[in-house]
């Protein structure tokens, strides 16, 4: 199974916003057009977006996936895994990634497919 990850970038600040994972490229494009037209920050500042394909490992359940992230504070050197159908699969990958990459912080995030995780927009301060 493949999902489509919609990421927005504030081009001036190089700040990234993970909007969500979508079941089709068309749904991701539709959400991107809506954000560029209507969501505070995304429509007011110079923002661009990208849509990347993400493979799902395991048998996907009722519309949610798990991803492992590792990062260092104040550093954009983020590592991320594929999508996983279950949290136990993601936790196994977390152990593998910790053994491979030196990062100060780690997490396993859950995303519901076809749902926007970042919904409120943003303002620059």
Image (cartoon, rainbow, N blue to C red):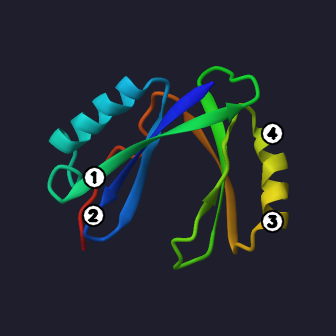
Q: How crowded is mark 3: few (under 14 residues within 10 Å), some or many (20 or more)?
A: few
User: Which of the two residues, 59 or 63, is positioned nearer the viewer here?
Assistant: 59
Q: Mark 1 points at which residue?
A: 48
Residue occupying the point 30% across, 71% down: 13
Q: How far apart are marks 2 and 1 (CA)?
A: 7 Å
Nearer the N terminus, badge 2 or badge 4? Answer: 2
Q: How far apart are marks 3 and 2 (CA)?
A: 31 Å
Q: Residue 37 carries which label?
A: none
Q: Residue 11 carries which label?
A: 2
At mark 1, the secondary structure is strand
Quarter of the image with the C terminus is: bottom left
Nearer the N terminus, badge 2 or badge 1? Answer: 2
Rendered location of residue 98, percent (x, y) = 80, 64
At mark 4, the secondary structure is helix
Q: Which mark is residue 100?
A: 3
The answer to the question of whether label 2 and label 1 lie on touching residues, with beta carbons closer than 8 A, is yes
At mark 2, the secondary structure is loop
Nearer the N terminus, badge 3 or badge 1? Answer: 1
């Amino acid at each position: 199974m493949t999902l489509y990850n919609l990421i927005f970038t504030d081009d001036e600040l190089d700040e990234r916003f993970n909007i969500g994972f979508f079941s089709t490229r068309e749904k991701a494009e539709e959400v991107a057009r809506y954000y560029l037209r209507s969501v505070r920050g995304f429509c007011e500042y110079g923002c661009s977006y990208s849509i990347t394909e993400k493979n799902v490992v395991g048998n996907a359940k009722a519309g949610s996936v798990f991803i492992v992230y590792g990062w260092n504070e104040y550093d954009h050197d983020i590592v991320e895994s594929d999508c996983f159908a279950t949290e136990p699969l993601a936790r196994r990958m977390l152990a593998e990634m910790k053994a491979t990459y030196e990062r100060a912080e780690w997490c396993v995030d859950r995303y519901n497919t076809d749902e926007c995780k970042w919904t409120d927009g943003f303002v620059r301060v």
